[in-house]
Image (spheres, rainbow, N blue to C red):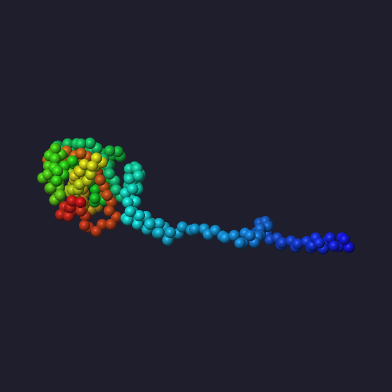
Amino acid sequence: MTKKKNKKEQGEPKPKRPVYLDQYGNPIPFLNQKEKDKPQKQEYKFGIFSLLGFVAAIILLASLTPFYSVLMLVTPTSIQEKILWPLHRNVTLYAQSTKFDKPVKVPIPEPGTLPVLGFDTGICFSFYSTQSAPDQKYIDAERLTGAVHGKNIAEIIAIGTQGKYEYHLKSITYSETIDNDGRIMSVICQKLGRAYAPTPKNIRALYIRPLEPFVAEKAIWNSTKHLYDDYSSPLEPEKTQIP
């Protein structure tokens, strides 16, 4: 009687769970109830709509806040140049104050050619002389006013890497800017403009013959690529305006 009672108290053995095997013969584990009740984590997938939303947010930040200016301020110049390389390039030809009083062949830095990204390409001279505060030591007010109306301050000829064709830089722009010390400068650029189609890919030689002597604080080869062109270029002399 005692043995039978003990067997009943112990109860019947629980039936074993069936074992299911995967394709490799390994047993497939069962999820217990606690694991089933746990909230399942949802994975976030980065798709095309997420990308568009991210781009839109960046555009809004750049247009409605000082985000772009702050970003450019903290970004090193070398990195900025690499980012803008396909659209905008500057090559310093004369880094210090230089007097132009006779014809000169401009020394071109390595690799020995100047880039041309499109019609908006040429040489820009900067002066500590403006229309409101002219300084005869650099350039007189008459030539500054002439540049505003599309008059050249020099004969500038560029020669492409292919052949000996001469490109005359006659499209003039005048603008004013402020240097790092807070001094106002005028900038006169002579560029290819729309006189040539197509433009060369690179320039291998550059010649300057000043019409009258002037002293430029700096001279830079500037080239900008225009992705959208509505044919109202400020490089056309009759449409030149002071910013």
Q: Residue 33 in the image: x percent, y percent? A: 64, 61
Quick check: can you spot residue 44? yes
- What residue is drawn where x is 26% and y is 41%? 180
Quarter residue 187 falls in: top left
- What residue is drawn where x is 14% and y is 37%? 137
Quick check: can you spot residue 155? no
Frontmost residue, 165 versus 208: 208
Quarter residue 26 falls in: bottom right
Residue 130 left/right relative to 204: left
Residue 74 left/right relative to 32: left
Q: Is the residue 43 above or below the residue 146 in the image?
A: below
Frontmost residue, 85 versus 65: 65
- What residue is drawn where x is 56% and y is 60%? 40
Q: Residue 142 in the image: x percent, y percent? A: 10, 45
Check the picture and name the quadrant holding the N terminus: bottom right
- State the count of labels: 0
Residue sitting farthest toward the left: 142
Q: Residue 159 in the image: x percent, y percent? A: 22, 44
Frontmost residue, 24 versus 234: 234
Q: Residue 90 in the image: x percent, y percent? A: 27, 44
